[in-house]
Image (cartoon, grey):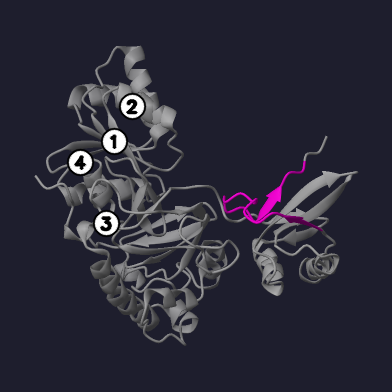
Amino acid sequence: MTDYYDNLETLPASERQTLLLQNLNTQINHAKNKAPYYQQHLKDFENLTDLAHLAELPLTRKSELIALQNSQPPFGGLASVEQGAVGNIFASPGPIYEPSTAREDYWRFARSMFAAGFRQGDLVINCFSYHLSPAGAMGETGCHALGCAVIPAGVGQTELQVQTINDLRPQAYVGTPSFLKIILEKGEELGKDVSSIVKALVSGEAFPPSTRDFFHEQAINAVQCYATADLGLIAYESSAESGLIVDEGVYLEIVRPGTGDPVPDGEVGEVVVTSLNPDYPLIRFATGDLSATLEGESPCGRTNRRIKGWMGRADQTAKVRGMFVRPEQINQIVQKHSEIERARLVIDWINESDQMTLYCESPQTSSDLKASIQSSIREVCKLRGEVEFVEPGSIKNDGVVIEDIRKYE
């Protein structure tokens, strides 16, 4: 039995880069020709000659989808198929609407399930929601692509789910980690046998070490994946439990929040994904999530890049004295002053009023530079802010650009 879903997972880096460059050019040209939004958004695009050149293309932000879809329903002109070719329309909070088509394993979940140990002939209980959200369909289509039978359980009705597991003996679980824990605890409470579950793919929420350890104590090998309703699978964990491996069906960048500029490897930033799904070709789609790349390859032998997983949200917009302050504004200020190596705006509540301080890593700390940066804050943010210089390397590498520490007592 092979350890890998396909040979893409073990490609040498040079071969993967060549293939990605070819696939990205194909996808971007396809989007320009078939998706009305990208016909305008990418009108000046010429073929990429290097993967790094992708960063020159504009972002499409998840936060923009509601307005785009309101102006051009149902998908804002981003889909490349006619509505008659859409199999389902799902809804996420916002609301944001996502299409799916009859394409096999549309969200590419089979790869992550294979890495979790799912195999042809397994019976899987799918406890992702089937109500409006695509999560249930993501799990089900991935299972079917692997040749697994599915119990479409959804969420809730815990006692019935426990009875079903007791009766049908599924080997695998897909859903949130917290609900699997609830099922196991309910099984013990009711005296029902749920020990048939020995492997699990979990997603949709945090998967802390304590929960993973609990599953290990129950003889369940549980790994996680990172996916969104728009993009499908982005990255997945293997049995090595050493970071999340980027899916072969996407190209992932980590950019500085508020910009489209890639950050150095290891630095926390916003996850930007270009999907190779031809039916919904999201190009440089800014997810609003934070993560960072990991050095080297996974010990499991898969050679694609790895990320740390979900590390919070990049949208750190704050309201200060009635005005919104956004990460992109902080980036504008930094760009105005080459002396600043990194900056973080801290907002506090002092003497019954909002106070902003921009902490700047800089080898130069002159009063003239401080005054100049303060002037830029007023110019860009339309608000007054203080400036404090700190030692280079002293600002934490966590992707935070705006830190709101206000406490109203």
At mark 2, the secondary structure is: helix
Give the residue at mark 1.
200
Q: Nearer the viewer, mark 2 or mark 1?
A: 2
The disc, 2 or 3, on the residue closer to the chain's N-terminal end is 2
Question: Which circle marks residue 291 in the picture?
Answer: none
The disc, 3 or 1, on the residue closer to the chain's N-terminal end is 1
Give the residue at mark 2.
215
216 to the left or right of 274:
left
Q: Nearer the viewer, mark 3 or mark 4?
A: 3
Q: Disc 3 to disc 4, how far (Cα)? A: 21 Å
Q: Nearer the viewer, mark 3 or mark 1?
A: 3
At mark 1, the secondary structure is: strand
110 to the left or right of 266:
left
Task: Characterize the local packing of mark 3: few (<14), some (14-19) or many (20 or more) Cα atoms within 10 angstroms.
Answer: some
Say if mark 3 contacts mark 4, CB within 8 Å: no
The disc, 3 or 4, on the residue closer to the chain's N-terminal end is 4
The magenta region covers 387-406
Q: Give amino acid for label 4.
A: Phe
Task: Characterize the local packing of mark 1: few (<14), some (14-19) or many (20 or more) Cα atoms within 10 angstroms.
Answer: many
382 to the left or right of 92:
right
Comparing 149 with 375, the one in front is: 375
Give the residue at mark 4.
118
Q: Give amino acid for label 3.
A: Thr
Q: Nearer the viewer, mark 2 or mark 3?
A: 3
At mark 4, the secondary structure is: loop
246 to the left or right of 118:
right
Would you say residue 57 is visible in this rendering?
no
Q: Give amino acid for label 2.
A: Phe
Q: Is residue 401 magenta?
A: yes
Say if mark 2 contacts mark 1, CB within 8 Å: yes
Give the residue at mark 3.
303
